Amino acid sequence: MSGKPLAGFVFNLSAMSAEPEPSAPQGLSTSAAPKLSGPASAALSGATSSSAPRAQGYEIVGSKSRLERLLAYRLLLLLALGVLALDQASKLWIASQLDFGTYPGSRDALVVVDNFFYLVHVGNTGAAWSNFAGHSSLLALLAFGTLTAIFFWRHTLGLRSRVAQAAFGLLCGGIAGNLLDRLVHGHVVDFIDLHFGPHFPAMFNPYPTFNVADSGICVGTLLYVIHSLRQPK
């Protein structure tokens, strides 16, 4: 074999090895995702980092909404807390002034208005007029159930109305006050003793001893009944 044909054969082999590899068809990529750099990469990272403040913003809006819903019942809550505080404070005061078991007609009872208004210190394990006496635990469960029912049926009861809120504020404060007594003492503390005299119906003679919580329950119930009767049908 001569020198020229051999040199040409070597040149052709070198040229074939230097040819570029065939590229992938358009639309297909050999990598999972393209790498970004420069302004595009900065924009992508900025969008990712901005997601956290937006999420926090949604949480703030949600908490404000819950607060606004709570404040919609502020009159009810304020009255309930006021009645509860006044009821418990008055019972603590009477306990510091009179021994437990100072019954109506006792010489140790405090006279506020002679022959009419006295302060005593007794316990009641029942309801009004000592009905269901000895069932304090059952009555405590009933009171708790009543408060729970009022919470879940607040829309049905129309508690967005200010009059209804005032009524149920008094009612709930009274229920909570007597419920707390049953949980702490095992009975309700009563201390207000009224004597109406023979000119009043028999149900008022003798009138049962009561407390601030009982007054809140009675006034709140009466107010809500009047409010309900005045609503258009």
Image (tube, helix red, strand yellow):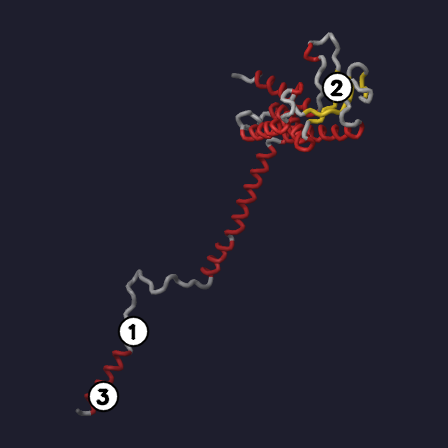
Q: Earlier in the sequence, mark 1 or mark 3?
A: 3
Q: Earlier in the sequence, mark 2 or mark 3?
A: 3
Mark 2 residue type: Asp
Q: Earlier in the sequence, mark 1 or mark 2?
A: 1
Figure quadrant of the N terminus: bottom left
Q: Is residue 115 above or below residue 135?
A: above
Q: Which residue is mark 2?
A: 193
Q: Which residue is mark 3?
A: 7
Horizontally, is 219 left or right of 47 in the view? right
Mark 3 residue type: Ala
Q: Which residue is mark 1?
A: 20
What whole-number distance in Å separates the C-alpha atoms at marks 1 and 2? 110 Å
Mark 1 residue type: Pro
Q: Residue furthest front?
A: 134
| Front label number (2 vs 3) | 2
Instruction: Tell me the crowding category of disc 3: few under 14, some 14 to 19, or many 20 or more residues within 10 angstroms, Cα based.
Output: few
- Mark 2, secondary structure of its residue: strand
**Image quadrant in which you'd find residue 108:** top right
- Counting from the top left corner in percent of width and height, residue 145 is at 57, 29
Q: Residue furthest top?
A: 199
Cβ atoms at labels 2 and 3 below 8 Å apart: no
Q: Is residue 76 above or below residue 115?
A: below
What whole-number distance in Å separates the C-alpha atoms at marks 1 and 3? 23 Å
- Mark 3, secondary structure of its residue: helix
The numbered disc on residue 37 is none
Q: As rendered, which of 35 and 74 lies closer to the eye?
A: 74
What whole-number distance in Å separates the C-alpha atoms at marks 2 and 3? 131 Å
Instruction: Tell me the crowding category of disc 1: few under 14, some 14 to 19, or many 20 or more residues within 10 angstroms, Cα based.
Output: few
